[in-house]
Image (cartoon, rainbow, N blue to C red):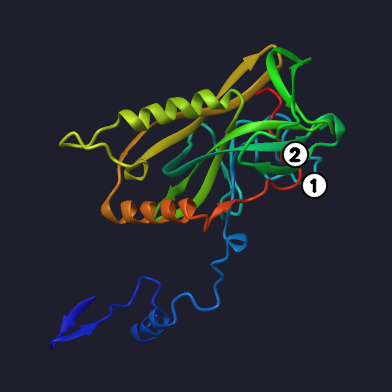
Amino acid sequence: MSTKNGKSVVKTEPAGLPASLLNRMREDAGKGVSTAQEDNLVPLIYILQPLSPQVNKRNPDYIEGAEPGDIWLRNSPNPIVPGDEGVLFQPCYFSKDWVEWVPRESGGGFVGRTEHCPTDVTRVADPKNPNKVRFVRPNGNDVIETRYHAGFVLTGDRALPYIIPMSSSGHTISRNWMFLMNTKMAPGNIKPPCFASAYRLKTKERSNAAGTWSTWDISDGGWLDEASYDRGRELYEAFASGAKQAEAPPSGVELDEAF
């Protein structure tokens, strides 16, 4: 906003909308847009794995050009990002849930999530990976503790809200990322909030006796400007208040068994 002859003048935005229309938009800001929690679900980011339907050309969920190790940004204009290129991500909120899944051999699929581990689970050794412990309910479903990092994917002049789920061996990556955030200090020995910085998220390949899969490779992306800081704090408050929450995984998406 600028002034001319003592009066406030709204400048025309880059989109070319007239100032008079922009003023009316400001007067009617938010009308007709739901703020209900169920209408404000934030999509999840996935690393595509060898068994992901999105990389199988014969699967109806196949995405053109998608390959194992790529990053899938659901609902984005450009949903597939090469893993070696990665994304710039502004973390804003962290939480944990226990997620129930139908095992892949039984058809697979997301069932639901709760804040605490169900009391009826049994700890059993994974027959495919003896070093892995599964939490199984009486109905045969797996319950997996999942760590969620909510924030913005920064692309050019856009900031797209997303959530990164991490489970099983992803817990170590999540904890290392949290350590990186906790040890980062601003000038004056100030411990900043997580949303003061961005991080570069790429993918890397890992293997064990159960197979080969891709996981996150995270590095510091630098400090953000004041406008980005305010945007991050607003998203933090939206998640902390429960106004926003994670979407349910779409059909055909499962946690990779290699984890």
Residue 185 sits in quarter: top left
Q: Is residue 229 above or below residue 219?
A: below
At mark 2, the secondary structure is helix
| Horizontal side, residue 9 vs residue 145: left or right | left
**Which residue sits at x=68%, y=33%?**
255
Element carrying mark 1: loop
In the image: residue 76, left or right of residue 157: right
The reply to whether dot 1 and dot 2 touch (C-beta < 8 Å) is yes
Q: Compute the Cα span from label 1 to label 2.
A: 8 Å
Which residue extends farthest left? 5
Residue 135, position in %: x, y? 72, 26
73 vs 177, nearest the viewer: 177
* Circle nearer the N terminus (1, 2): 2
- Location of the N terminus by quadrant is bottom left
Residue 219 lies, in percent from the top left, at: 39, 30
Q: Camera-side residue: 173 or 114?
A: 114
Q: Is residue 215 above or below residue 226?
A: above
Amino acid under disc 1: Pro
Numbered label attached to residue 60: 1
Task: Classify 10 Å Cα crowding around label 1: few (below 14), some (14-19), many (20 and above).
Answer: few
Residue assigned mark 2: 53
**Local crowd at mark 2 within 10 Å, few (<14), some, or many (≥20)?**
many
> Going by the image, does 154 lie left or right of 171?
left
Split into 4 quadrants, where in the image is the C terminus?
A: top right
Horizontally, residue 61 falls left or right of residue 37, namely: right
Under mark 2, the amino acid is: Pro
x 51%, y 23%: residue: 172
